[in-house]
Image (cartoon, helix red, strand yellow):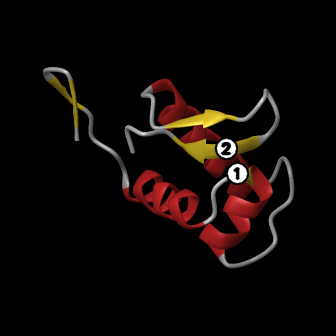
Amino acid sequence: LFKGEIMIRLGKQQIKILEILAEHPDSTILEVGRMFHGKTITPGGKEYNSVCRSLHALETNGYVERISGQIKWHSTSKA
């Protein structure tokens, strides 16, 4: 994927999260984590923190955004 002249490389987890958000827009971190890991995750756990890191990296690069400052996310038109 390209951002201007700079190539942005997305990891497998980030790509999977974008696919999840494409199918389930406006999902919370817990919802994305449950769909990604196939089990319920808990805030502060390693799976939760991993999903948080990926979402924040995607946000920094403009692929997702928070909805109204809540912990819900959706894809941007860039994704």
Total count of labels: 2
Q: Quadrant of residue 40?
A: bottom right
Kindly indicate whether the residue at mark 2 contacts the one at mark 1 (C-beta within 8 angstroms): yes
Residue at the image point whose x is 59% and y is 33% from the top: 56
Q: Amino acid at mark 1?
A: Asp
Q: Secondary structure at mark 2?
A: strand
**Which residue is denoted by mark 2 in the rendering?**
73
Mark nearer the N terminus (1 vs 2):
1
Residue at the image point whose x is 83% and y is 47% from the top: 44
Q: Position of residue 51 (x, y in %)?
A: 63, 50
Residue at the image point whose x is 26% and y is 34% from the top: 8
**Which residue is denoted by mark 1 in the rendering?**
26
Residue 45 located left or right of residue 2: right
Q: Position of residue 53 (x, y in %)?
A: 60, 39
Q: Quadrant of residue 52?
A: top right
Q: CA distance from mark 1 to mark 2?
A: 5 Å
